[in-house]
Image: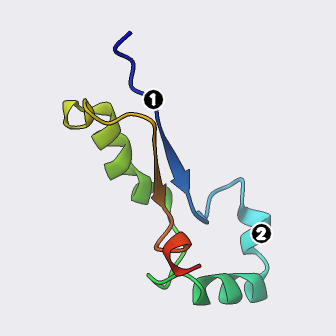
Amino acid sequence: YNINVNAIGPGYFKTQQTASLFADKEWVKKTVARIPLGRTGIPQDLAGVVVFLASEASDYITGQMIFVDGGWLAAL
């Protein structure tokens, strides 16, 4: 059917939906300490992956989950 199915696995991102979570400064401190890049994400951090997956550059990629998490999973 020539259908590519991929997904983006976001890490912790500061958005309107997560505002209450990020209001807990102790949680933020502990979480950021476990992220190799030393910060949580912002929505703009997803832009490159979204553009890539929507472009012809990803035509031969399917069945993949691309994690945008500052290295969180790699550090587990």
What percent of the width, then of the height, locates residue 75?
Answer: 53, 81
* Residue contact at pointers 2 and 1, CB within 8 angstroms: no
Which residue appears at 43% of the width and 53% of the height? 46
Looking at the image, residue 29 lies above or below residue 14: below
Q: Circle 1 sits in a helix, a strand or a loop, which is it?
A: loop
Decide if residue 29 is on the left or right side of residue 35.
Answer: right
Looking at the image, residue 67 lies above or below residue 53: below
Given the current orientation, which residue lies at the most extreme left position?
57
Looking at the image, residue 44 lies above or below residue 74: above
What percent of the width, then of the height, locates residue 71?
Answer: 47, 74
Q: Circle 2 sits in a helix, a strand or a loop, which is it?
A: helix
Task: Report which residue position mark 2 lands on.
Answer: 21
Q: What's under tag 2, amino acid-wise? A: Leu
Of residues 5 and 55, which is closer to you in this image?
5
Which residue appears at 26% of the width and 36% of the height? 58
- Indicate the quadrant containing the C terminus: top left, top right, bottom left or bottom right: bottom right
Task: Report which residue position mark 1 lands on.
Answer: 5
Which residue appears at 49% of the width and 74% of the height? 74
Decide if residue 64 is on the left or right side of residue 52.
Answer: right
Classed neighbour count for the residue bearing mark 1: other residues with Cα under 10 Å, few (<14), some (14–19), many (≥20): few
What percent of the width, then of the height, locates residue 42?
Answer: 50, 63
Location of residue 28 by image quarter: bottom right
- Indicate the quadrant containing the N terminus: top left, top right, bottom left or bottom right: top left
Q: Which mark is residue 28?
A: none
Q: Mark 2 or mark 1, which is nearer to you?
A: 1
Q: Earlier in the sequence, mark 2 or mark 1?
A: 1
Decide if residue 43 is on the left or right side of residue 51.
Answer: right
Q: What's the distance in space between the residues labelled 2 and 1, CA to CA?
A: 31 Å
